[in-house]
Amino acid sequence: MENILVVFNYNAGRKKAIKYKKILHKFLFKRGYSFKFVSVQDFQTNDFSEYKTIIAVGGDGTVNKVAQIAALTDKTLGIIPCGTANLLAAKLGISTNIKKALRTIQKKNIKEIDALKINDLQCILRCGFGYDSDIICKTPQTLKNKFGYFAYFIAGILFALRLKSKSYQITCDDNTFNIDASCIIIGNASNMYRNIVYLADNSQIDDGLLDIFILKAQNPFSFFWEFLRIIFGIRINNPRAKYLKAKSVNIKNSWAVCHIDGEKTKLNKDIEINVIPGAVKVFSN
């Protein structure tokens, strides 16, 4: 009998995860699994050797925490998306409908995806500095509870009206350059707003490459112009933006606030970002 650990973020998706608990219990019990339900705050105290699969019920922040354990313990990650963004689920073709998401797990189609190592931290999707960090870290939870993913769109417009620029020295593989930027996004998957907007061409989560987007726009007009180009798939280096791919990135840094898979993080030394190929096994469509 297969043992499954189910990790809940009970506050995710306007507390939708609470409603999912009964459905998950019925699904696992009916199929004869042995299982345990725990909260995301407490799950790291478990003995993971008992389990073959760990299912994360929540948003990208929850999935990232569970994925780190899955990678370290060689467990397979299942995802029931019910957060605000659910970007990894969207990239893997996992539905936000719980019954369809459970069918994905039941099919047992396993995909090995890359992870990112950011200094001593690990994540699955991306880290963001400047404008991107402001949107993720400063959008009020009350706004997300009321509007869901659209809250980030509202915050994005507001923060675009007050762009701030910072000077960076960046090394991508062996290429070093100095640049003034209002936003830097370094991602394993560059999908934004579900799978509607991408910040890189041919972005894959198992290609061993980082997708790097650097926004040089200094004012709302140039920002919105570049955003329109991205929506229409025009991702070309220009005075407003720079697009790169690399296996590693180094950012000279004395102090920075960023987000790592949606979690606010403070970094007070040079930032080293590398790809860990095939780090996580995950159920995918």
Image: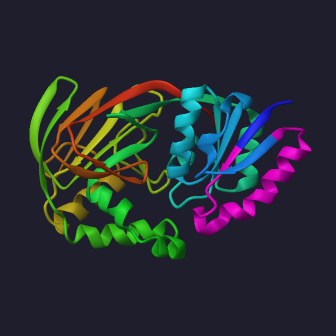
- 252 to the left or right of 6: left
Magenta residues span 6-34
Q: Position of residue 194 (x, y in %)?
A: 50, 54
* Residue 88 in sight: yes
Looking at this view, is 273 or 177 the one in front? 273
Furthest toward the front, the residue is 45
* Corner quadrant of residue 213: top left
By secondary structure, the bulk of the magenta-drawn segment is best described as helix
Looking at this view, is 133 or 218 the one in front? 133
Q: Position of residue 183 (x, y in %)?
A: 23, 53
Looking at this view, is 187 or 136 the one in front? 136
Looking at this view, is 267 or 210 the one in front? 267
Magenta stretch containing residue 168, yes or no?
no
Q: Position of residue 30 (x, y in %)?
A: 91, 45
* Corner quadrant of residue 186: top left
Residue at x 31% of width, y 56% of height: 132
